[in-house]
Image (cartoon, rainbow, N blue to C red):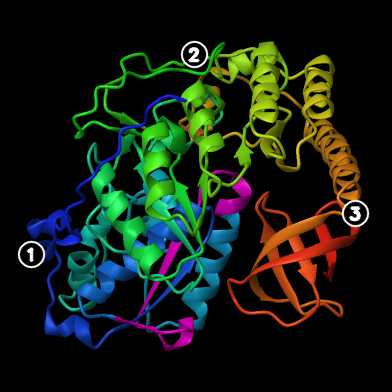
Amino acid sequence: MRHFSRISHIPPLSQFINPVLNSAIPVPEKLTDLKYYLQTYGCAMNENDSQIVSSILHSAGLKSTDTSDKADLVLINTCSIREKAEQKVKQRLHELLKQNKRAKIAVLGCMAERLKSSLLEEKLAHIVVGPDSYRALPKLVEAVMCDGKKNAIDVQLSLEETYADITPVRNNEISAFISIMRGCNNMCSFCVVPFTRGRERSRPMASILEEVKLLHSKGIKEITLLGQNVNSYCDTTSDSVNSHENTPGFSELFKSRPSGARFAQLLANVAEEAPNSRIRFTSPHPKDFPQEVLDVMKAYPNLCKQVHLPLQSGSDRILYSMRRYHTQQAYLDLAERIRNELPGVALSTDVIAGFCGETEEDHQETLKVLRTVRFEQAYMFAYSMRSKTHAFNAMQDDVKEDVKKGRLAEIIEVVKEIQKEINQKEIGKTVKVMVDGPALKGNWDWTGRTEQNKRTFGKGSWKLGQDIEARVVSASSQTLFTEEL
Ligand code: SF4
């Protein structure tokens, strides 16, 4: 096995607290009387960002409340990935403006970054804050809520902001997210993320390990490392001079890569720092799985054998126009290598139906990959064109809606059928489940997830965070049902 250098001395968290931060978060007495309500849409990254926002607001003296009716300030952390996601948020904003006329509304996250001042012009918000400007929130809130300003906006993207020094406010006693990097340089032609989240930057490894250590000492059972392109992680502040290495057969648009401590090294260090916790990571790009990452995943039993491998399309032609610089064969080779190297691994994926120029033959290539790799889980969507993207500027959204929907239905059917077959094979086997709460359906007592992240139900006494071994007695395409051993 290759050698993964370990950081032996980890300085305390206080060392990472930027003194500028504390002075940058004013605690005006005016703010201490205010109550805020924060609602989150979208991905795990947004959930973690909301925890960072809560931490910043608490430092500025605001108190949280559990309903929007009681709040003086309502913050909505938003997602822009698809048109539908934005429509949902806009509907919610209209509702809030009607329900609580007294409150000021702040829109945060990707929609704030994408729509900027148009949210103010449309009178959908009083405050608009992009994902790299959360430190400015108290100042902006004060301007609007205390100093009589009509509205306030900060949507400046940053090349450095990682919020490394802010400890998120977490409510979950057993699972935690840790952001390790932000932004994306890949510019996939369908994706708005590089425009809403900015350039890729990684958090210093020492600050991540300090947070992991803290969570582990509190008994957190599951840690998920987060990033828009999580396995592209590169800590340029470390002494490490590892250069960037792509997955064999994969290349990328962004060529000039700095050297630094890379994802494999971070994974190994996190696994050692939290030996009793399950470690997961999301969302990776298939281009960043050099052998070293698989070696580390093999070496540490607490690194969950679960890999997300976004496919998007199975057609070489469409992959190229999506700016995913690999072939179907390179993808299949990677999936096979992962299955061989990590026995029992669960693979999940993302698929887009009906991207610009997709023909029936291209669609059949996607189905072919789905049938070959046999994913345990998939997130499947019909293509939705987003402004600012390369596709928006240079391509035609020329696949008719009913064709997109038909192809999506076919993709879902193939995936579901395979998932059902995979889960049926689990019947009679013993699985280890981490219980994450009471079962809220049927006659089951508890629910939890396996190492492969499969939703599982069981009977008998349980405790939150307990590891239970149980025998699978039946299964659907999404769920395992067990009996006590
Ligand atoms: S890798 Fe591609 S799909 Fe993923 S966030 Fe970056 S641009 Fe979007």
Residues at circles 3 and 1 in contact by the CB criterion of under 8 Å: no
Q: CA distance from mark 1 to mark 2?
A: 43 Å
The structure residue drawn at horizontal position 22% and vertical position 56%, both measured from the top left corner, is 165
Position of residue 406 relative to residue 473, above or below, is above
Q: Which circle, 3 or 1, is nearer the viewer? A: 3
- The answer to whether residue 19 is left or right of residue 401 is left
State the residue position of label 2.
Answer: 251
Q: CA distance from mark 3 to mark 2?
A: 40 Å
State the residue position of label 3.
Answer: 427
Position of residue 121 relative to residue 402, above or below, is below
- The answer to whether residue 375 is left or right of residue 210 is right
Q: Is residue 225 visible?
A: yes
For residue 76: magenta? Answer: yes
Which residue type does callout 1 highlight? Ser
* N-term-proximal mark, 3 vs 1: 1
The structure residue drawn at horizontal position 84% and vertical position 28%, both measured from the top left corner, is 371
State the residue position of label 1.
Answer: 23
Question: Between residues 220 and 169, which one lies in front from this camera angle?
Answer: 220
Q: Which residues are magenta?
A: 63-86
